[in-house]
Amino acid sequence: MTGIGMTRTLGLVTAVIMLCACGGTDGGRSQPAEVGQGQQQLSGNDHDHDHDHDHDHEGEAGGGPVTMSPEGQTRAGIVARTLERGSLDAADRFVGVVKPVDQRVSHLQALGRGVVVEVGAAVGDRVAKGQRLAVYDNIEAGELSSRLEGARAEVARLTVQLVQARRQEERSRALFDVGAIPARIRENAEADAQALEEAARAAQSVVHGLETQLRRFGAAADGGPFHSEIVAPFAGVVVASEAAVGEAVGPGTTVFSIADLSRVFVDAQVYEKDLGRIRAGLPVRIRVDAYPEKVFGGRVAAIKHVLDTSTRTATARCEVENAEGLLKLEMFASVSIPGQGSTQALLLPGGAVQYIEGRPLVFVKSSADKFEAREVSVRGTGDPVELVSGIKDSDQVVVSGAFQLKSVMLANKLESGHSHD
């Protein structure tokens, strides 16, 4: 290619990109009429060449695959993935609120009476399993320690008495054997030794019981500071706290409430007139203002059987996975529940659909660095749109950066058409 030809090709590439940029609306979606006009202008400027590159294989559009290195894909923001199934048929939409799953909330109490001396967590904090939330001076543990010391002293006293009773039993047996004492005295000595042995065993059981209680409090069985800890039983978020330094705590008083938010409920308020179309098990799509581009999938877990008399609504409890922790408690949400007759179709972000000469197409990733333009049929004009035909469930469809691929594809077509100059 001559220097003049190279200059001409670069000019054509620049023109295509400028035309695509002018034609793009709504975050990169180009309108059919504008793209068609751009194509006609380019054809007019190159009337000396009659090569026809518009006849492609069935189901494909454009002039062949687009090649782009992984590094280039990253810079261009290219993202490809398989599509999810859903429906844009008339759906019932309700307002909901994010709530914790009841069975995943733990209310933590102090095991014994005491006074809080340290607080390590507050409402809203995310905590790990076993993390220390608070420390309290365990008054009950101190009392148990005193009782333990008394029980140990009783064991020691009974042990000494038992040793003496065993010796007396042996002497009585020896004297009885030589006829020095009657059988009654020997029997009394044996009975005394047996009684002391039983008493010592009972006292030792008391010691073991007190030591076990102290271990449950987290206090050392050999004395020392009687501080006990309140720890998180699982990873989660602190949703309530009554802990403050100097606060008296004890059994029956909730100090912390921890919720596992890896799965949450979204309670949607369903009007009485809509209840006939809603049932447990239906799929739901959740959106929140904090993440307008993200859709959270779930299902209707249950419908409450009591209506709010002031709003005439019943609660449809929707269970939603929240592994990333994006949904926060008490967030407002928009809940879409498709009708029972809705069909499930592949859903495509609106920005992924590009137009060439009025034909909608998407880009499918065929290998690590190659993308194919494929003509599709879509339904809807919003975001997302339903994919009627042209794509399989297993296809990796470009959902971000499709406009950049379209620009490269058009530039390649123009360069190919003038490569003989």
Image (cartoon, helix red, strand yellow):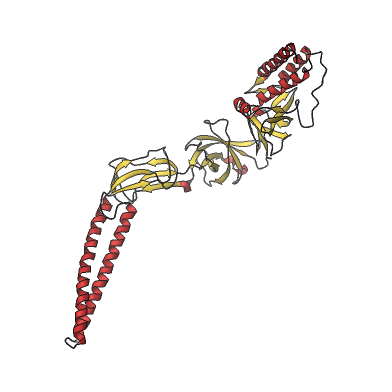
x and y, in percent, of residue 350 in the image:
65, 28
Residue at screen point 25% across, 70% down: 199
- Indicate the quadrant containing the C terminus: top left, top right, bottom left or bottom right: top right
Residue 348 rendering spot, x and y as whole percentages: 66, 32
User: Which residue is at the front of the view, 239 or 237?
Assistant: 237
Q: Would you place residue 411 above or below residue 201 in this image?
A: above
Occupied quadrant, residue 155: bottom left
Residue 5 in which image quadrant: top right
Name the foreground residue: 43 vs 65. Answer: 65
Instruction: Estimate the x, y position of residue 78 in percent, counting from the top left.
Output: 63, 28
Seen from this angle, which residue lies furthest left?
Answer: 180
Is residue 382 visible in the rendered image? The answer is no
- Above or below: residue 338 compared with residue 222: above
- Between 249 and 29, the one lying in front of the other is 29
Q: Is residue 317 left or right of residue 80?
A: left
Q: Position of residue 322 (x, y in %)?
A: 52, 40
| Residue 38 in view | yes
Q: Above or below — where is 363 with respect to 117? A: above
